[in-house]
Image (tube, rainbow, N blue to C red):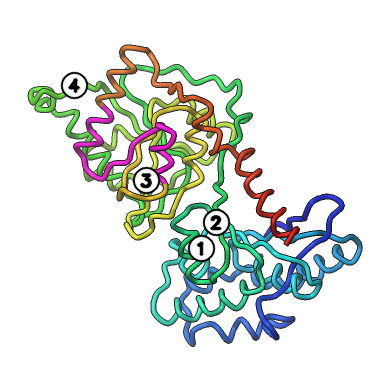
């Protein structure tokens, strides 16, 4: 829970969700829990003991110096608990940001009574907010249906400065595919890529008219091998998969810039069309073709289409054709680096998205 402050020289905002709700003791939120909540449900609230101290610290700041608006970012939900209580106490407008959804969070995966009760809790906490913010249009629509409040889309974005002067590692023959970050078993599936690699290795690929691709290596940086290795072994391509430990952010950036192709795995549930992983924005900054695997038609595919930075596939044939295409380009040019016009990438920079957020805050302050 990072504390966020309003503009210099302004006043602050915060407050609990509803009349008499969540104002001082944890008993109020406990009443919204199911009788026997699951461990996954409770994990969503592990930071609640921080709420009381955070409210007291925030109140001290607000008494010393006025602010114009309060911005809280979910998750965890505790951030919104704090903002709601401060907003009501000091009568200052509040903007509630959802990097991920709360009750309908795709990571936690609630259903039934737990979903009903937590949706009720979310509505009570958030009802004092003046404006909501989230990362994509599909998620904005879901929040608007739940809360009946205006919702703005502010994406994550990338910092152009992080990629300035980063030199790629020397690239050998074939294709180096890079994936950075965590992978969620059962929700993100690299198996289709491994199946394609096995097929491209088969001599029948070229006999059927396929273009030779050369050796392919898939590098996973900071990914748990247990989530990937069994799938590679099952496909018979374990020798093509390389694991790297967690590393500083600067090294992850260099790994992306050194890739021939960057891999992103869409959430397997087609209903979760609003998910846009933060890594895809860094991939845009690396200016390498992005191979996305998963259900089509979501917000992440729209980002790829708008920038021309990659393609989304749910079928092995499309993945194979994508790899063959970029193998030909690399052989001809010696690199797969994209020459995307800056104006197509600009809306996906953090600088641009910060401007969008600043406009939301301005409108809330001006009423």
Q: Earlier in the sequence, mark 3 or mark 1?
A: 1
Which residue sits at x=61%, y=30%? 162
Where is 99 relative to 193, above or below? below
Side of 242 relative to 53 (left or right) = left
From the viewer's perspective, is the residue at label 2 or at label 4 nearer? 2
Tell me the element at label 2: strand
| Residue 181 position in % (x across, y down) | 48, 44
Disc 3 to disc 2, C-alpha distance: 21 Å
**Callout 4 crowding tier (Cα within 10 Å): few <14, some 14–19, many ≥20:** some
Q: Mark on residue 265?
A: 3
Main SS of residues in magenta: helix
Q: Earlier in the sequence, mark 3 or mark 4?
A: 4
Q: Which of 262 and 37 is in front in this view?
A: 262
- Magenta stretch: includes residue 322: yes
Tell me the element at label 1: loop
* Residue at which label 1 appears: 101
Which residue sits at x=56%, y=41%? 157
Residue 50 visible, this orientation: no
From the viewer's perspective, is the residue at label 1 or at label 2 nearer? 2
Q: Mark on residue 211?
A: 4
Where is 228 relative to 73, above or below? above
- Magenta stretch: includes residue 239: no
Quadrant of the image for the C terminus?
A: bottom right
Side of 214 relative to 107 (left or right) = left
* Residue at which label 2 appears: 134
Q: Which of marks 1 and 2 is nearer the N terminus?
A: 1
- What's drawn in magenta, residue-wise? 300-323
Side of 258 relative to 269 (left or right) = right
Q: Mark on residue 263?
A: none
Where is 163 relative to 350, above or below? above
């Amino acid at each position: 829970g990072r504390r966020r402050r309003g503009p210099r020289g302004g006043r602050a905002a915060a407050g609990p969700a509803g009349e008499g709700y969540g104002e001082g003791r944890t008993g109020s939120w406990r009443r919204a829990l199911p009788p026997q909540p699951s461990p996954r449900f409770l994990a969503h609230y592990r930071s609640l003991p921080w709420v009381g101290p955070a409210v007291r610290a925030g109140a001290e700041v607000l008494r010393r110096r006025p602010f114009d608006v309060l911005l809280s970012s979910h998750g965890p939900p505790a951030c919104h608990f704090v903002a709601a209580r401060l907003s009501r106490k000091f009568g200052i407008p509040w903007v509630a940001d959802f990097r991920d959804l709360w009750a309908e969070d795709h990571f936690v995966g609630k259903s039934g009574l737990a979903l009903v009760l937590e949706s009720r809790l979310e509505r009570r906490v958030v009802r004092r907010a003046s404006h909501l913010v989230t990362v994509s249009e599909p998620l904005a629509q879901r929040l608007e249906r739940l809360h009946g409040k205006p919702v703005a889309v502010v994406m994550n974005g990338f910092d152009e400065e992080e990629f300035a002067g980063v030199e790629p590692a020397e690239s050998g023959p074939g294709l180096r595919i890079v994936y950075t970050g965590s992978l969620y078993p059962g929700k993100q599936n690299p198996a289709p890529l491994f199946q394609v690699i096995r097929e491209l290795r088969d001599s029948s690929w070229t006999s059927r008219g396929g273009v030779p691709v050369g050796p392919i290596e898939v590098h996973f940086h900071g990914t748990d091998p247990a989530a990937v290795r069994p799938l590679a072994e099952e496909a018979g391509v374990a020798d093509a998969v390389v694991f790297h430990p967690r590393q500083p952010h600067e090294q992850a950036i260099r790994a992306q810039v050194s890739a021939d192709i960057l891999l992103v795995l869409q959430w397997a549930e087609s209903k979760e069309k609003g998910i846009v992983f933060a890594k895809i924005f860094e991939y845009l900054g690396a200016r390498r073709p992005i191979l996305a695997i998963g259900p089509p038609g979501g917000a992440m595919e729209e980002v790829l289409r708008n920038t021309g930075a990659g393609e989304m596939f749910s079928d092995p044939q499309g993945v194979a054709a994508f790899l063959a295409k970029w193998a030909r380009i690399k052989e001809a040019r010696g690199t797969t680096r994209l020459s995307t016009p800056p104006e197509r990438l600009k809306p996906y920079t953090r600088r641009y998205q910060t401007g969008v957020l600043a406009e939301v805050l301005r409108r809330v302050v001006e009423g």
